[in-house]
Amino acid sequence: MKGLSFVNLQEQLLQGPTGHYTWQDEFGVQSSLFESANGDLSLWHKTIQFPGVLIDHLKIKAPSSVVIQTSEKIPSTINLGFTLQGTTKSFFDDLPHPVQNAPLKHNLLYLANPAGKHVLNPIKQLENIHLAFQPEYFQDIISDDEPPFEKIKDNMERKRSMLFALDHGLIDLKIQQVLLDICNCVMKGSVKRLYMEAKVLELLALQVDSLYKPTTSGKNAADTDLFQQIRAYLTVHYLEEITLHSVCRHFGINEFKLKKGFQLHFQTSVIRYLTSLRMQQAKQLLELGECTIFQVSELLNYSHPNHFSIAFKKYFGISPSEVRRAKKVF
């Protein structure tokens, strides 16, 4: 397993221009931020912690993979993982198969022993948000007699690591919005802790609802395969001029089945899914500073940059120009 270790990445960055590090503790909410860049390497690492919960937000730019090693000395945790950009592949000592995450995917794991290796592939940039719950905190907030949580509680009692769902969930618009709320919280004092905890619980509820699939789902195997193909097609061709009609023609189905089936399988519409992919790509390009607003609007097939700016602000709550000229405020 080759790649630049996370420790070596930090060391190389520290040898370059001086990085920026801040730390604060407000009413039990501890926050730290480290950011630095050196040539084609850059690291942006934010942590937020309050009793029972750790939030870890990581952005990396590197020409090759970055490997993070976790120690078996780390206590057991319930982990909520959200990959926004790039790909990750984790090898845990307690799980028989590696856990792979693609862009805009999420899953939940219980790790009795968190020891393992994580291979991060930035492509252009990797962005990952990870939440870790202490078992005692998690047990206090779940209803262990309901189906979604029965299996988790059983594995926690047996101290047996588990992946909540074999198929990773899609980071849909609702989940994206809560992640943005958490990452962009500007509240201060004790109100910040109340807000952050409420948003973390909302995120957990949305994730479990997305991943938990009762046996009576109203889906059949043929339709599931068809709509997986449709989503894969959209994920590849999202920058092209795609319409509902063109998708229907490509897959030989009618518009009613496309709309109803896509909503049933992915809890979002075709248009919203396309918008999500396009806006995330736009945000990535603006953050990297490789394109102007005009160039990004052209890439997304907007007739005028102002139309793109309005749509971008409606989606993210901030304008494209703000993304280009300012770092995020937490």
Image (cartoon, helix red, strand yellow):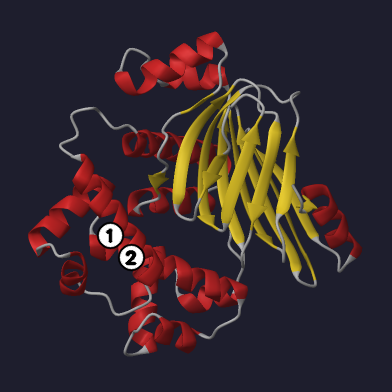
The relative height of residue 137 versus residue 168 in the rendered view (above or below) is above
Could you tell me if the residues under marks 2 and 1 are in contact, i.e. CB atoms within 8 Å?
Answer: yes
Residue beneath the point at 34% across and 90% down: 304
Residue at the disc numbered 2? 234
Q: Quadrant of the C terminus?
A: bottom right
**Residue 271 percent across, percent down from the top left:** 25, 65
Query: Residue at the spot x=16%, y=67% of the render?
Result: 248
Residue 330 at least partly seen: no
**Residue 12 at x, y = what percent?**
86, 60
User: For the point 82% across and 48% down, which residue is it?
Assistant: 7
> Is residue 13 rendered to the left or right of residue 250?
right
Q: Amino acid at mark 1?
A: Ile
Tell me the tag on residue 319.
Answer: none
Classify residue 80 as left or right of residue 118.
Answer: left
Q: Which percent across, then down, holds residue 30?
A: 67, 39
Q: Amino acid at mark 2?
A: Leu
Q: How far separated are the C-alphas under marks 2 and 1?
A: 6 Å
Picture residue at 63% right of the left edge, 60% below the top: 122
Asked whether, in this view, residue 154 is left or right of residue 173, the answer is: right
Residue 36 point in image, percent of width and height: 77, 63
Quadrant of the rendered image containing residue 149: top left
Residue beneath disc 1: 230
